Image (spheres, rainbow, N blue to C red):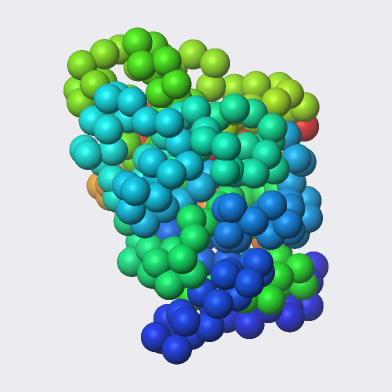
Amino acid sequence: MKPTSTARIYRPTRRNLATLANVLARGGLVAAPTETVYGLAADALNAKACRAIFRAKGRPADDPLIVHVDTLAQAEAIAEWNEAARLVAKAFWPGPLTLVLPKKPGVPGIVTSGLPSVAVRMPAHRLFRQLIRLSGCPLAAPSANPFGYVSPTTAEHVRDHLGRRIGHILDGGASKIGLESTIIDLRDTAHPALLRPGAISKEGLERVLGLTVSAHGRTVPTKARAIAPGMLERHYSPRTPLILSPALSPELIGRVPANEALLFIRKPERVPPFKNVFWLARSGGSLSEAAHNLFDRLRSLDTGGWRSIHAELAAGDDPLVAAINDRLSRAAAKG
């Protein structure tokens, strides 16, 4: 059952942006769009404001936040930079890439979960960048949803689940990418590590760095401390049980019980008239389309009364294969 909404959704007018930036500057919370997913933003240098993020989401204090910046100067004010970080920032910022670096003293401990490192990103979304600029502060912003649930990619998603806990949502349309940012740990420049796959691929990072990027250690036990978001074994999870399959066979259609949903990466060539068959992209569609639709589809299936969801894993050499399968695997993990 959806909560009764009290949050106001704001159109992205100049006046509304100024109003919401003032809310942030005064220590309030604003849910806002990025190119990845919608984030729940607060002044990253205001510990009290950032604690309100944790309360609104029900997020454990040992799961650090990502700090979003508008300029390289802002990023350098909160983190200790190195040559590797400068290389990847030049190649991929603004964009869906988060860097984990040693933090500077001004970053509150609540933001980093008491760790000596900080996660920092320069988003590509025009409206989010404007909020940073107008508020005059870097913005800490995890996904704008209850902790552990499917991430939001529209303003309506945010209102559906946080509408009674926050007051302000900026509507910037559906998030373009639909999956959270890639996270790379660059504290040790000789041994960069991929902590979360996203639209920026491991191979792309390796080409820029001229180094092998380790993909080990991307998952920590559910109750363990992570150095960056999105590393818990169970995350992005619908309440409906999710069952993974390397490749859903079209022959399964009609054999799966009518109260169990089938979720294909792409629309099967011939779809019989069964109401429990869904897909993320059109026949022959791209994985970018599938990624864009993933969280929206999981949310709609989760409220559809299905007993379970059988989801197909992505395949191929597209950079988004790892990101899509990472989200599906964590969503399907047992709690």
Q: Quadrant of residue 169?
A: bottom right
Q: Horizontally, is 67 left or right of 54 in the view? A: left
Q: Horizontally, is 302 left or right of 74 in the view? A: right
Residue nearer the viewer, 306 or 137: 137
Residue depicted at x 75% and y 40%: 61
Q: Relative to residue 189, is residue 199 depicted above or below?
A: below
Residue depicted at x 57% and y 43%: 106
Residue 328 horizontal/vertical position (percent): 54, 36
Q: Horizontally, is 76 left or right of 235 in the view? A: left
Residue nearer the viewer, 276 or 136: 136
Residue 55 horizontal/vertical position (percent): 78, 55
The number of numbered discs placed on residues in the rendered structure image is 0
Q: Relative to residue 163, is residue 286 depicted above or below?
A: above
Farthest-out residue, front: 105
Residue 49 horizontal/vertical position (percent): 69, 59
Residue depicted at x 77% and y 32%: 335
Residue 110 horizontal/vertical position (percent): 70, 43
Q: Relative to residue 40, is residue 93 depicted above or below?
A: above
- For the question of whether residue 216 can be seen, the reply is yes
Q: Horizontally, is 208 left or right of 12 in the view? A: left
- For the question of whether residue 333 can be seen, the reply is no
Q: Relative to residue 196, is residue 14 depicted above or below?
A: below
Residue depicted at x 55% and y 29%: 117
